[in-house]
Amino acid sequence: MTAPSAVLIRPLGADDAPALLALYEHLNPGDAVAPLAQARAVLAQPGLTHYGRFQADALIASCNLAVIPNLTRGGRSYGVIENVVTHAQWRGQGHGQALIAHALAQAWVVGCYKVVLTTSRQDPAVWAFYERCGFSASDKRAFVARRPAD
């Protein structure tokens, strides 16, 4: 009998860009993804970390954490988690929740006083998922402005 493959969460680097872009097909199917060179540049941005959860060598889930310097709250930074995605084949198995727990832990380690997460999903099951991850929908209200069409 073969031992199950190890599951690993780690920050993504430039070499992970192709796998991350492929995974994003499961975030918003059919949505255009960034060119590879741009993805590599974004993965190298200071203050922005993309975390990946791997099953063996396959990237199965990801999110990013931006740590924003701040002048209120005693100068403590805050975090923003975005682009939470789990490959469709791996959903419902706890991978996304473990990944978000890891990103939150990293935010607390660097001294963030809060972490914000927004979602455009209108599915109550998705909202319940984020609440199970420790987020509250009643603490703040998010507003979004989109760039006007050219």
Image (tube, rainbow, N blue to C red):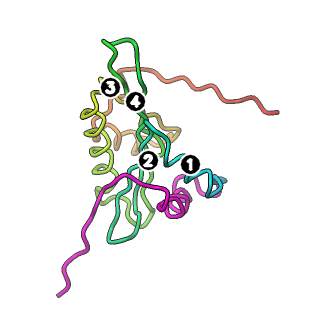
**Identity of the amino acid at label 3?**
Lys
Q: Are marks 4 and 3 in contact (CB under 8 Å)?
A: yes
Q: Which mark is residue 84?
A: 2
**Among numbered discs 1 and 3, the one appearing first in the sequence:** 1
Left or right: residue 82 compared with residue 108: right
**Among numbered discs 3 and 2, the one appearing first in the sequence:** 2
Q: Please name the residue that numbered disc 4 is placed on.
A: 116
**Identity of the amino acid at label 2?**
Val
Quarter assignment of residue 138: top left
The magenta-colored residue range is 1-30
For discs 1 and 2, the disc positioned in front in the rendered view: 1
Give the residue drawn at x 40%, y 32%: 67
Pick the front one: 144 or 63: 63
Q: Please name the residue that numbered disc 3 is placed on.
A: 114
Q: Is residue 15 magenta?
A: yes
Q: Is residue 88 magenta?
A: no
Pick the front one: 47 or 125: 47
Give the residue drawn at x 56%, y 48%: 41
Disc 1 element: helix
**Identity of the amino acid at label 1?**
Ala
**Among numbered discs 1 and 2, the one appearing first in the sequence:** 1
Q: Which mark is residue 30?
A: none
Image position of 144 with respect to 132: above or below: above
x and y percent of residue 90 in the render?
Answer: 38, 64
Where is the N terminus found, in terms of image quarters? bottom left
Label 1 – label 2 distance at C-alpha: 19 Å
Where is the C terminus found, in terms of image quarters? top right
Label 4 – label 3 distance at C-alpha: 7 Å
Left or right: residue 106 compared with residue 34: left
Q: Please name the residue that numbered disc 1 is placed on.
A: 41
